[in-house]
Amino acid sequence: MQLAAWLLLAILSAGVAASEAVASPPVFRSGTNQFTLLKPLDPAPATPVRALDGTISDLGRCRGKVVVLNFWATWCAPCVVEMPALDRLAATSDPGQLAIIAVSIDSAGAAAVAPFLAAHRLTHLAVFLDPELRLGSRNPERIAAGALPLRFLPISYVIDKQGLVAGYLIGAKWGFAGSTPIPRLFSPPATGGTMTAPNDPIVPIPRYEELSSAFQARARRGKERLGVNVNSLHAFAHSEKLGGATRDFFESVAALTSLSNELRLLIRLAVASANQCRYCTAHQRHQLIGLGVPDAKLAAIGAPDSAALSPRERAAVRYAQAVTIDAADISPAIYAEFIEHFTPQERVEVTIVATAMGMLNKCNDALLVPLESEFEALVS
């Protein structure tokens, strides 16, 4: 842990070093996403935020240190997974060199955050409150004024010793299963490429003309749904029998459920977001937009306590996220809410829709399937 922190300090010890590192960037990653360097480097916002004890502070107090600035919320399932890892990092790092700051965007502020920290025994993090989303925001006007973009939740920004934002890391899975639950902040150096460029898929994406007749039929159905040739579907064509059966299973989940199409897509979006799968997140957002679902409801997937979701939608989204994060550790409250709003048949179907989506997320991420260019704007 200490070595990882010092490696990070060495990489980001000066703004010049960070900017020069773009050509040969450090490998700094979560379990699912690679750290993205930013260029040019902009100053971190000086927006004041309130600590749990009521004192006001800003990032200027950390000048001279490297800062990992994490945005999170108590209702965010991936954040719940991430927080213990960040707390361990804070406990084992030199506070004079590395600051780990967790900024909660809970609308309830300290009333929600303090009990959460106590329940999870998180005692080493510097925790601040940003319920009005001023330091970090999804609002384009606030972002233009200097707020840090909250592309996903959780998201961590790294700020160098000169107070410049060096880049960001999306995702919760800093820790990995094993006897020693220590966050793995660095993986072995990748060969070729850069962190900001998409990886090449590990299987070629065949053209439509190269597909078998059975896969051409599947490809046509995929194009009818999304309006483009679906890279994921084409990638599966390398395995005619198993790949074909798997794609047929995914189609059958959509065709045979009694759930509405909108609810099914909201569940899929909740799972893709929890898994930080850019590919599937973009596809679900595209289809929901096509159904006329408002932006407020799409944004509510990252904040399921939002009034934009109906009680039934909220129950499904929370349950789907909990299943995705740890199906063996779903809280009684989430179960109770889910059971209240869904029949036994629907509970089975929501579970199948969610877990099938999780499987598709993993397949697409593992195969490094590239997102179609038409959808990049949906997750940028």
Image (cartoon, rainbow, N blue to C red):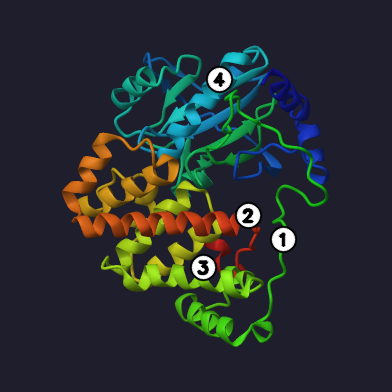
Which residue position holds label 1?
202
* Circles 3, 4 touching at the beta carbon (< 8 Å): no
Q: Earlier in the sequence, mark 1 or mark 3?
A: 1
| Spatial separation of the CA atoms under disc 1 and disc 3 | 18 Å
| Spatial separation of the CA atoms under disc 4 and disc 2 | 28 Å
In the image shown, does 273 or 324 lie closer to the viewer?
A: 324
In the image shown, does 340 or 42 lie closer to the viewer?
A: 340
Q: Which-is-in-front pick, marks 3 and 4?
A: 3
Which residue position holds label 4?
88
Q: Which-is-in-front pick, marks 4 and 2?
A: 2
Q: What amino acid does circle 2 point to?
A: Ala
**Does dot 2 land on a helix, a strand or a loop?**
helix
| Disc marking residue 366 | 2
Residue occupying the point 42% across, 69% down: 287
Q: Is residue 235 left or right of residue 339?
A: right
Q: Earlier in the sequence, mark 4 or mark 2?
A: 4
Residue 151 versus residue 229 in the image, above or below: above
| Spatial separation of the CA atoms under disc 3 and disc 2 | 15 Å
Which residue position holds label 3?
246
Whole-percent x, y for residue 87 in the image? 52, 21
Whole-percent x, y for residue 230 in the image? 57, 73
